[in-house]
Image (cartoon, rainbow, N blue to C red):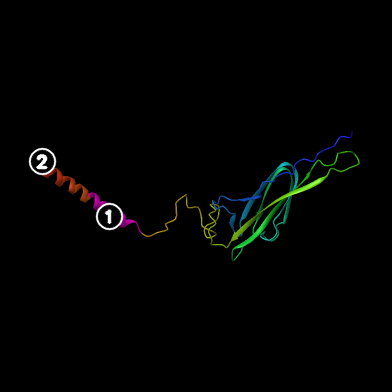
Amino acid sequence: MPSRSWPRAQPRPTPIRPTSRSRSPAPEFVGGNQFTFSATADVDCDWTVTYTDGRAAGQPATQSGEGESFSGSYETKTVTKIFKSPITATCAYDDGSAESSSWTEPAAATASASATVTLLPVGSDAGDDDSEAGAGGGDDNGVLPDTGGSNLWLFAVGGGLVIVGAGAVIAARRRHAST
């Protein structure tokens, strides 16, 4: 009986991840800046990553590499309004469905993953600590933004309540001591 080679399971590339130091769940970047991406799979791949619409002029749309993971970066174009564009990673791999011999090529299969990159206009805050001041904020050294009015009135009311409480305790002790 001839031996049969069973195909390997299809690789599961993790979603391609454009990354920044932003805490936003969706990848948002101020246009005109650089972002990095990474993609991984559980098999060796010939990677092709494509980012066409949001890239800066002169930047190649496609990047390639080999291995179980691949990462790189893209310079983005400057935008005047919110702009969303896809980035796609494709993993070409030998699926093991054809036996290797000198006269046959290994069978090729592909798996892909994609994400949407959101570019924000200059002056927007993508929450990215690397952005320049005026291009999406700046390094605020971890200080939260002031989103309300003055809190001085709360301090004054609290101080007044402490003084009233202290007066009530003194009056109660004097009344108790005199009886």
Asked which quadrant contains residue 102, the reply is top right
Q: Residue furthest bottom?
A: 80
Q: Residues within 10 Å of mark 1 (few under 14, many from 20)?
A: few
Q: Secondary structure at mark 1?
A: helix
Q: Residues within 10 Å of mark 2 (few under 14, many from 20)?
A: few
Quadrant of the rendering where the C terminus is positioned: top left
Q: Secondary structure at mark 2?
A: helix
The span picked out in magenta is 150-162
Residue indicated by mark 1? 157
Task: Say which mark, if any, is on residue 177.
Answer: 2
Task: Say which mark, if any, is on residue 64.
Answer: none
Q: Position of residue 5 (x, y in %)?
A: 83, 37
Q: Residue furthest front?
A: 1
Is 27 situated left or right of 93 in this image? left
Q: Which of the two marks, 1 or 2, is nearer to us in this view?
A: 2
- The image shows a total of numbered marks equal to 2
Residue at 81% of width from left, 46% of height from top? 108
Q: Residue furthest right?
A: 103
* Three-letter amino acid code of the residue under disc 2: Ala
* Three-letter amino acid code of the residue under disc 1: Val
Q: Position of residue 32 (x, y in %)?
A: 61, 59
From the viewer's side, name the closer residue of 117 and 63. 117
Q: Residue furthest left?
A: 179
Quadrant of the rendering where the N terminus is positioned: top right
